[in-house]
Image (cartoon, rainbow, N blue to C red):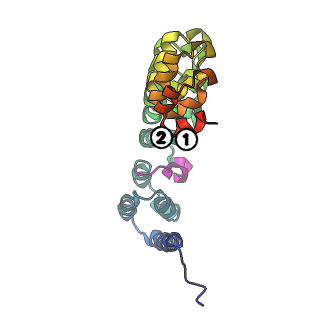
Amino acid sequence: MNTGFLKTSGHVVLRRLNKEVIRRIKMAVKVSTPEEAIKQIEALSYSQRQAFTFMEKLPKKILTKEVCLFAVQHFQYASQLVPEKLKTAEMCLAAVTYQGQSLREYPKELWTPEICLAAVKQDGQALHLLSEELKTTEICLTAVKQKPYALEFVPETIKTEEICKIAVAEDGRTIQYVPDEMKTEELYFLAIRSNGMALQYMPDSMKTPENCLNAVMQQHSAIMFVPEKLKTAKLCSFAGSQGHRICSR
């Protein structure tokens, strides 16, 4: 019996991948110019893992400003490998424009309004990295437009009706981060229209047959948040197979 034989296709793929990674490591060690490095990083941009491994094994003298600038604009985790002396405002801006969460890899003294804005414009969730002092209205609004769930990290003083409505209209579940005094009947209706699962955050007093129907029609899974007394045969039928399963319990 050949114990070295890999029976499953998953194992075969993994072994091939490991061989490819080893090949890239050997190639990285042999790279002699920054131009070569850039060429290889570009060729590997389809694989985050291989690009990271390749750059990690590059000789230090090859990690020039040009190589690092190219890398941070082509694969997600490149900023982790940028030498500290090269972590400038220019490098940081290039990195966050490609991947907003890369902001965490750069010194906070580089976090200017321009750089923070660029970060949340690419990934609204990067807002959670910022201190309260850096969270301006413009930055918060940009973050929420890009990623509605960024509303969770918006300071209460900036959570206006406008910004809350933008988030809820995009994903109704974000109503959980809206201040209570702004949770109007209109906003709840907007929430379940954009995502039926927002029904879970609606007060029972507002869970009318109409609202429950709208929620379930938008998202069948919302049937689990409908009060028992409102789970009619008609409503359960709208929820499809999931509705029949929940309603027949």
Apparent side of residue 201 relative to residue 214 in the rendered image (left or right): right
Which quarter of the figure has residue 230? top right
Which amino acid type is marked by label 2?
Cys
Apparent side of residue 31 relative to residue 82 in the rendered image (left or right): left
Residue that carries the numbered disc 2 in the rendered image: 92
- Queried whether the magenta region covers residue 77, the answer comes back as yes
**Residue 77 to residue 206: above or below:** below
- Queried whether the magenta region covers residue 198, the answer comes back as no
Numbered circle sitting on residue 14: none
Numbered circle sitting on residue 106: 1
| Quarter containing the N terminus | bottom right
Q: Position of residue 241 (x, y in %)?
A: 50, 40
Q: Is residue 103 visible?
A: no
Question: Tag 1's secondary structure?
Answer: loop
**Residue 7 to residue 69: above or below:** below
**Residue 178 to residue 108: above or below:** above
Which amino acid type is marked by label 1?
Tyr
Q: Disc 2 or 1, which lies upstream in sequence?
A: 2
Q: Position of residue 106 (x, y in %)?
A: 55, 41
Q: Is residue 14 visible?
A: yes
Q: Position of residue 19 (x, y in %)?
A: 49, 74
Which stretch is magenta? 74-85
User: Alpha-carbon neighbours of circle 1 within 10 Å: few (<14), some, or many (≥20)?
Assistant: many
Q: Outermost residue, bottom direction?
A: 1
User: Alpha-carbon neighbours of circle 2 within 10 Å: few (<14), some, or many (≥20)?
Assistant: many
Are the two marked residues, 2 and 1, in contact with CB atoms closer than 8 angstroms?
A: yes
